[in-house]
Image (tube, rainbow, N blue to C red):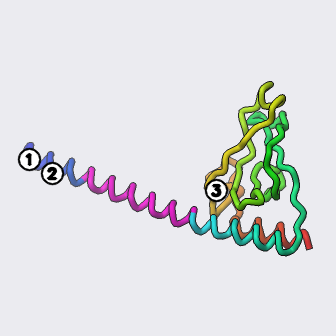
């Protein structure tokens, strides 16, 4: 293989990698947009049905500590590690914790909602976000 051929091959590989990364980014953005619509629908429906909200609490990464947040909303899983606040933002409620968090509380930042909750997790259990949110609404009625 000549030097020119090797250079062309490397350029083709770079372009293929770039195209793959761009396609993956577009797929992820579309997934997050669809999930955001689901969350917005859930908040509107929960509000319409009068589903009671609760003060959301975060847990430490080790699972032992519980820390106050300034958030109000609905837990969407039994473990209470994921929630939707009244403003329609999705939150993962696991935080580093520690003494400062215990004294002053924590401020978990919103994160993009996944279409499938638990996908890629070690336990192999995953569930569509739509199913979780619908189940939460159905259980309240």
Q: Nearer the viewer, residue 19 or 88?
A: 88
Between marks 3 and 1, how big is the CA–CA gap? 44 Å
**Does dot 3 land on a helix, a strand or a loop?**
loop
Of labels 3 and 1, earlier in sequence is 1
Q: How many marks?
A: 3
**Does dot 1 land on a helix, a strand or a loop?**
helix
Residue pointed to by mark 1: 4
Q: Nearer the viewer, residue 30 or 103?
A: 103
Q: Is residue 18 magenta?
A: yes
Quadrant of res 58: top right
**Does dot 2 land on a helix, a strand or a loop?**
helix
Magenta segment boundaries in residue numbering: 13-32
Is 84 left, or right, of 65 in this rendering? Answer: left
Question: Which mark is on residue 96?
Answer: none
Residue pointed to by mark 3: 119
Residues tagged 3 and 1 counted as in contact (Cβ below 8 A): no
Q: Is residue 78 magenta?
A: no
Q: Main secondary structure of the magenta part?
A: helix
Is 14 left, or right, of 7 in this rendering? Answer: right
* Mark 2 surroundings within 10 Å by alpha-carbon count, few (fewer than 14), some (14 through 19), many (20 or more): few
* Mark 1 surroundings within 10 Å by alpha-carbon count, few (fewer than 14), some (14 through 19), many (20 or more): few
Location of residue 29 with respect to 101 vertically, above or below: below
Between marks 2 and 3, how big is the CA–CA gap? 38 Å
The residue shown at (76%, 56%) is 85
* Image quarter of the C terminus: bottom right
Between marks 1 and 2, how big is the CA–CA gap? 6 Å
Question: Which mark is on residue 8?
Answer: 2
């Amino acid at each position: 293989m000549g030097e020119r051929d090797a250079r062309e091959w490397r350029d083709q590989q770079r372009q293929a990698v770039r195209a793959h990364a761009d396609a993956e980014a577009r797929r992820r953005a579309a997934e997050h947009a669809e999930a955001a619509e689901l969350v917005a629908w859930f908040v509107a429906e929960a509000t319409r049905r009068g589903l009671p909200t609760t003060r959301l609490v975060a847990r430490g990464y080790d699972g032992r500590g519980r820390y106050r947040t300034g958030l109000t909303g609905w837990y969407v899983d039994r473990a209470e590690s994921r929630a939707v606040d009244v403003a329609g933002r999705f939150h993962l409620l696991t935080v580093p914790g520690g003494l400062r968090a215990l004294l002053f509380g924590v401020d978990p930042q919103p994160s993009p909602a996944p279409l499938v909750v638990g996908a890629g997790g070690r336990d192999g259990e995953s569930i569509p976000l739509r199913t979780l949110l619908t189940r939460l609404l159905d259980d309240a009625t």
